[in-house]
Amino acid sequence: MKNIFVGNLDFNTGEDELRQLFEQYGPVDRVAIMTDRDTGRSRGFGFVEMTNTEDGEKAIAALNGAQLGGRTLNVNEARPKTERAGSGGGGRGRDRGGRGGGRW
């Protein structure tokens, strides 16, 4: 199994089009184009999961720098998703230990 990152996608590129592009190099298990949560528009990148690692490597070599929809694709092996620590929040407004007299 090979998980591939595809960046610099034209915002009108669909998952079917991306699947067809990669299927030239071997069986594709899954395709996902990331979309904006609020607008539903493409964020310009996605992921392709290929069944065979060798086929995935061939696809990366062939398609990195290729043109699709007038854009030059950035294709490479996807990095594993990293865990985010906590919820963020930045620390403002939490226990301030009595410093600063209540001013921000």
Image (tube, grey):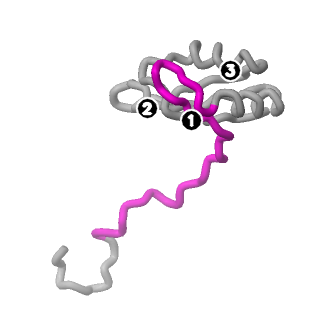
Residue at which label 2 appears: 43
> At 45% across and 24% down in the image, what residue appears?
10
Residue at which label 1 appears: 74
Position of residue 73 measured from the top left corner of the image (x, y, whole percent): 55, 30
Closest to the observer, 65 or 37: 65
Main SS, magenta residues: loop
Mark positioned earlier in the residue sequence (3 or 2): 3
User: At numbered mark 3, what does the secondary structure look like: helix, strand or loop?
Assistant: helix
Q: Would you say residue 65 sits in the magenta stretch?
A: yes
Could you tell me how far apart the alpha carbons at marks 1 and 2 are, in whole angstroms?
14 Å
Which kind of residue does numbered mark 3 sit on? Phe
Mark positioned earlier in the residue sequence (1 or 2): 2
Mark positioned earlier in the residue sequence (3 or 1): 3
Which kind of residue does numbered mark 1 sit on? Asn
Span highlighted in magenta in the image: 64-93
Closest to the observer, 29 or 58: 58
Rendered-image quadrant of the C terminus: bottom left
Closest to the observer, 94 or 60: 60
